[in-house]
Image (cartoon, grey):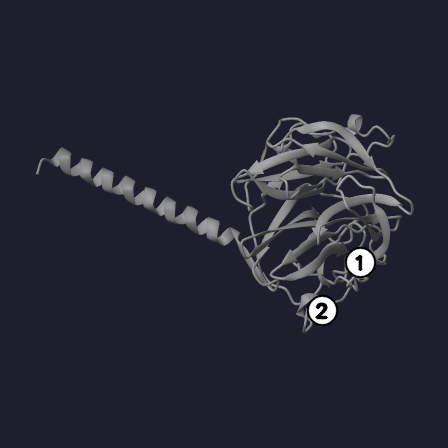
Amino acid sequence: MNRSIYHFRILLYSIGLQLLLISIANAQDVTDSLFNFRSNGNPIINHKYTADPAAIVVDNTLWLFTGHDFAGGQKGYKMKDWCVFSTTDLQNWTEYPTPLKLEDFSWDKSGSAYAGQVIKRNNKYYWYISTNGSGIGVATADRPQGPYRDALGKPLLTNADCFASKHSWTCIDPTVFIDDDGQGWLFWGNGVCYYAKLKKNMIEIDGKVGRIEFDGMQFEEAPWIHKYKKKYYLSYASGFPEKIAYATAEKIEGPYTYRGILNEVAGNSGTNHQAIIEFKGNWYFIYHNGARQRDGNSFSRSVCIDRLFYNPDGSIKRIVMTSEGTTIRGK
């Protein structure tokens, strides 16, 4: 064999081997970046501080999206990215690589990654996020675990859209809901509860911004919409320190009727933020408090899950926060 051909073949073999090793290493990195853990009660996540939960169910998997408090014992909010987890049984969980960071939104000037929610439509996942003063943005991904990318390059909503508010942090806490007729809706706000229709592309507001008001409403923030037996349920953080209250309506735009408190002040956290979702035939109330020992507090929060039960008349039984969570027999 010609010596030059022989050396060329050796070179090709060497390059191929290096590429194979790089491929294996990359695959191993992806595997290693997944973190599997088991929940043994509340809080369900104990290796980091999580807040502002939102959840969706895709097939037989519950996907949990959260904010990320920087560390324990904080004296102020330090939130720079968001987290994503999945489970098929509420006991065994997988955490995925960081799906979205504040720096992914070049328009943000606040430096604070506030609450958001993910929904699936058009074979894509849309993550509506908020920041402290810059507004509400939307990022998209092809998979629930991401990675997500800013869909607009600018805010979807800003304080200018919040016509009844004066303070700078009013345009926060988006929650998204797709009704049975296919219409998408976005609710948000601090101090005032706003809502608007979404166009089918899910990245544009369709029409005017409205406001939800009703007797007995003491709206702070954290709206969440769900539907049960053809009725719309609007839950939200009420007062400060925050309890979670709720109201019901025959139409998503209202009028709403106040139904009472869902759960009390956590005691060790001034804020609360809830998601209400059905999973495998049961309803769950997902929320945060400051119960991770010993450094949990209002700025170092942790996500918890307890069962939610309806009364025969459609009202919701008071949520009891437990340390056992869904590990309780019958939960």
Residue 299 seen in this snapshot: yes
Viewer-side residue, 80 vs 282 = 282
Quadrant where the C terminus lies? bottom right
- Identify the element where label 2 is drawn: loop
Q: Left or right: 83 with respect to 158?
A: left
Looking at the picture, does residue 180 appear above or below residue 137? below
Q: Residue at x 71, y 66 (%)?
A: 325
**Labelled disc at residue 324:** 2
Q: Position of residue 30 (x, y in %)?
A: 47, 49
Q: How many marks?
A: 2
Which numbered disc, 1 or 2, marks the residue that appears first in the sequence? 1
The residue lying toward the viewer, choosing from 42 and 262, is: 262
Q: Residues within 10 Å of mark 1 (few under 14, many from 20)?
A: some
**Residue 33 got which mark?**
none
Q: Amino acid at mark 2?
A: Glu
Residue hosting label 1: 315
Label 1 amino acid?
Answer: Ser
Badge 2 density bin: few <14, some 14–19, many ≥20, Cα 10 Å: some
Q: Position of residue 257 (x, y in %)?
A: 85, 48
Q: Quadrant of residue 291?
A: bottom right
Q: Tell me, yes or no, if residue 155 can be seen here.
A: no
Looking at the image, residue 163 lies above or below residue 193:
above
Residue at the outermost left position: 1
In the shown orientation, is residue 272 left or right of residue 175? Answer: right
Q: Label 1: state its secondary structure.
A: loop
